[in-house]
């Protein structure tokens, strides 16, 4: 941290933070928050409120960062912006797990949803990865609060900050391990899902002027370009991994490393990837591609006289 005339003038930043850049980030995330909110309401994609919360955290983070840049010795401002910007992508990762689980549910026939297909029981994809995500969130929260709430003038400040960084590193390690495995699973499904596409297409009929397709015998509509959403999931996985690796390097090397000494590293390797994740789901909004984005997948009413046995069993499976 930079030194000043007195202890009260010590900045919490190892560089001069830019109010202008933080302002641009605030505006960009603010626009995507409004955009995502409108889509969420229009499509009744209520599970996407988790993503809205994550974007709101980014908005709050950069709004407070503007104030913090103008008052870099204020501990409260620094702590707030540090914590929310660190934790927002963890929520985004959680909602990506949910979206992937819904894709599997709607695209893969019930009898094909096996451990062999995804290396993990498909119906447990969301619960397993979201559990790791919550653990990662809590651990990173403890570490972030410990780091951001410690003043350099405190007794044993260096030890407290190092302990907080180590705790945050554990949380990031959990996130990277779980999200890394999920990225492999999602990438593998990108290729294996092609064999289900023909089967799915054979059970679809056009509706809504060709914009959507209806699963024969069921009431659910699926966008015929659903694979675009899968592309967005895969790209988002890579972007969040880039951001997480950056944060690991930042915490591991300490405040004297080149990564920590220059603000532009944070904007290029954290802010930009996270913003691209948000944008990708604005353009390829899950509620526009999947028939159900509520907190639970409802059982679809089926006309037994119009559907085969495997289609019937498909609707009886509990939602992911």
Image (cartoon, rainbow, N blue to C red):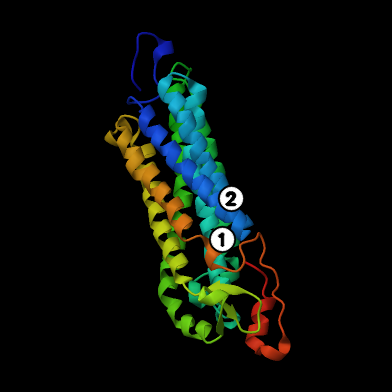
Residue on which disc 1 sits: 98
Mark 1 surroundings: few (<14), some (14-19) or many (≥20) residues within 10 A: many
Q: CA distance from mark 2 to mark 1?
A: 10 Å
From this view, report whether residue 155 is shown above or below residue 176: above
* Residue at position x 52%, y 23% in the image: 76
Q: Nearer the viewer, residue 116 or 8?
A: 8
Q: Which element type, helix, strand or loop, lies under badge 1?
A: helix
Which SS class for mark 2? helix
Direction front: furthest residue: 209
- Viewer-side residue, 272 vs 215: 215
**Residue 50: assigned label:** 2
Decide if residue 308 is on the left or right side of residue 150. Answer: right
Circle on res. 122? none
In contact (CB < 8 Å): disc 2 and disc 1:
yes
Give x and y (percent) for residue 309.
Answer: 66, 88
- On the question of residue 171 being in view, the answer is no
């Amino acid at each position: 941290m930079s030194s000043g005339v007195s202890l009260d003038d010590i900045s919490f930043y190892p560089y001069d933070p830019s109010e202008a850049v933080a302002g641009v980030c605030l505006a960009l995330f603010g626009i995507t928050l409004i955009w995502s909110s409108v889509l969420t309401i229009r499509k009744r994609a209520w599970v996407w409120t988790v993503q809205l919360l994550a974007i709101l955290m980014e908005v709050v983070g950069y709004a407070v960062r503007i104030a913090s840049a103008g008052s870099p010795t204020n501990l409260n401002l620094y702590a707030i912006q540090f914590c929310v910007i660190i934790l927002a992508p963890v929520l985004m990762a959680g909602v990506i797990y949910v979206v992937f689980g819904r894709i599997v549910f709607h695209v893969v026939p019930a009898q094909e949803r096996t451990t062999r297909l995804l290396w993990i029981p498909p119906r447990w994809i969301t619960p397993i990865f979201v559990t790791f995500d919550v653990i990662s969130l809590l651990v990173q929260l403890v570490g972030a609060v410990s780091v951001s709430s410690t003043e350099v003038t405190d007794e044993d400040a260096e030890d407290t900050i190092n302990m907080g960084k180590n705790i945050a590193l554990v949380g990031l390690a959990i996130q990277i391990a779980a999200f890394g495995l999920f990225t492999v699973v999602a990438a593998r499904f990108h290729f294996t899902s092609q064999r289900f596409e023909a089967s799915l297409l054979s059970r679809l009929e056009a509706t809504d002027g060709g914009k959507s397709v209806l699963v024969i015998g069921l009431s659910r509509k699926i966008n015929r370009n659903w694979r675009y959403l899968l592309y967005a999931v895969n790209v988002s996985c890579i972007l969040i991994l880039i951001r997480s690796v950056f944060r690991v390097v930042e915490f591991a090397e300490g405040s004297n490393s080149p990564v920590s000494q220059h603000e532009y590293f944070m904007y290029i390797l954290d802010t930009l990837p996270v913003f691209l994740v948000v944008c990708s789901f604005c353009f390829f909004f899950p509620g526009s591609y999947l028939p159900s984005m509520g907190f639970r997948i409802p059982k679809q009413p089926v006309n037994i006289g119009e559907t085969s046995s495997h289609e019937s069993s498909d609707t009886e499976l509990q939602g992911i």
